[in-house]
Amino acid sequence: MKRVLALLGTSAFVLTGLLFMSESNQNPLIVALRMSTRDAASRKAPSNQCARMYEQFPSHPGFIDTTGKEVIRTKYEDTGSFHEGRASFRKRDGWGFIDKHGKEVIEPKFSRVRDFSEGLAAVRENKCWGFIDKSGNFVIKPTNWCSTTDFRSGIAVVGVGTKFGIIDNAGHFIIPADLASVESIEDGAYRISRSKKFGFTDKFGQITVEPKYDDAKDFSEGLAPVLESGKWGYIDKVGMIAIAPRFSHAQRFAHGNAVVGDGAKFYLIDREGSRVGKADFSYMTAILKDDVKANLQYEASLQDFTPVAYGAGWTFINNRTGAELGTSRFASVESFSEGLACVKMYDNPKVVIAAAAEAKRLATQAEKEELEQEKADAIEAAKEAKENANSYDVNTSEN
């Protein structure tokens, strides 16, 4: 490891003494960096070990813009992303908010906070949740809610003990806290359950389908699978039966068709419930895979930049051009929000880059040695096989 220390230089002696104290290439950081280098070659997602490794180098939190330039340098223990011009931060044991100039606009006095949405942010005080405005004033005072979501379309889901309800932006209940579950689904609507029966609300919290089904799945293409008396069928968004329950299995619609089961047989149906083609599992699998792929592409298109990690740390890839966002590397990153991304910047990036370069060299050397060893083993195996063949020929001729 003397070559590594020489490469990094005496100015980084204290740090490198911690990073490279091992006398072998099995130092965890070197191993992680070597793994990261191999990830880079194939553009694979970084391993958890690599992600943890990046944060072991000294760094500080801050925000960068879409050119990679540091625009806000912070001193906080933790920070969140910007939402509606506010980002949460943690100082000592409290959470507050900063604006896009890095100024503290809401003091850190809450035990927990959520992001701003529709002008309000949920905050926890004395083990109860309430909502504040962008000036830090309570709009909905802390109540006996043990959990909450952000506001969306003027409503939020709150938890009271083991039950859930839906409130408006004045804190009044639209649906009382007597629901066993409330799950967000397509188009901002919710799937709800009460007394082990499932139904739906619209995005404003109004019940559109009373909880009366034994089970229900999300809507897709305007229809949702529901279970009634042991059979699956489909309903529309106002609760009308679109396809009568008669299937043992039912999946969501994709490209106008859905996979259903009749005992051990699976096949496709259209939106009227009529069978499409022959029962062909591979064909159905292909359709489902296409749907998943389309969803992944859609989700990726929502972001202009995708976080990636390899080499000396994290960076961003432009989803439109495939180009990297500058040459900087970061200890950790979060997705862009409102033109800014929360990152942790290395205090001494030269040390990290040098370590990554050494790791790359070691990885290349190790791979070369492995190839040479494999080649030597193959030659030895061929030689041994030839000797065995000659020995067999001699023994055969003597007999």
Image: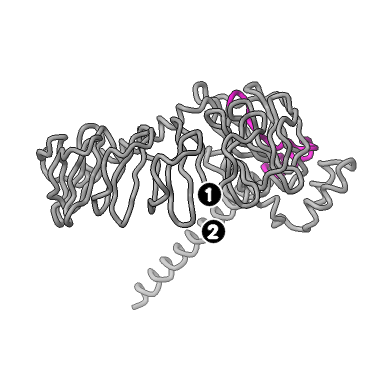
The residue that mark 1 highlights is 145
Residue 84's spot in the image, x, y percent?
A: 59, 26
Toward the viewer: 236 or 294?
Answer: 236
Could you tell me which residue is drawn at 66 percent across and 46 percent down? Answer: 33
Query: Residue 396 or 354: which is nearer the viewer?
Result: 354
Q: Verify CB contact (< 8 Å) between mark 1 and mark 2.
A: no
- Which labelled disc corresponds to residue 32? none
| Residue 206: x %, y % from top left | 34, 36
Write down the residue under mark 2.
377
Residue 350 is covered by the magenta coloring: yes
> Is disc 2 placed on a helix, strand or loop?
helix
Count neighbours of disc 1 (C-alpha within 10 A) and say few if under 14, some if 14 to 19, many if 20 or more: some
Q: Position of residue 152 (x, y in %)?
A: 46, 33
**Which residue is found at the position 62% from the left and 46% from the top?**
124
Q: Please state which amino acid type lies under the numbered disc 2.
A: Asp
**323 or 390, nearer to the observer:** 323
Q: Is residue 387 above or below residue 44?
A: below
Relative to 67, residue 44 above or below:
below
Quadrant housing the C terminus = bottom left
- Front-lying residue, 329 or 159: 159
Can residue 312 be seen here? The reply is no
Q: Distance of mark 1 from mark 2, alpha carbons? A: 68 Å
Q: Is residue 82 a member of the stretch shown in magenta? A: no
Residue 106 in view here: yes
Who's the residue at 65% across and 33% down the image?
A: 137
- Which segment did they paint magenta? 338-360
x, y percent for residue 251: 24, 45
- The type of residue carrying mark 1 is Trp
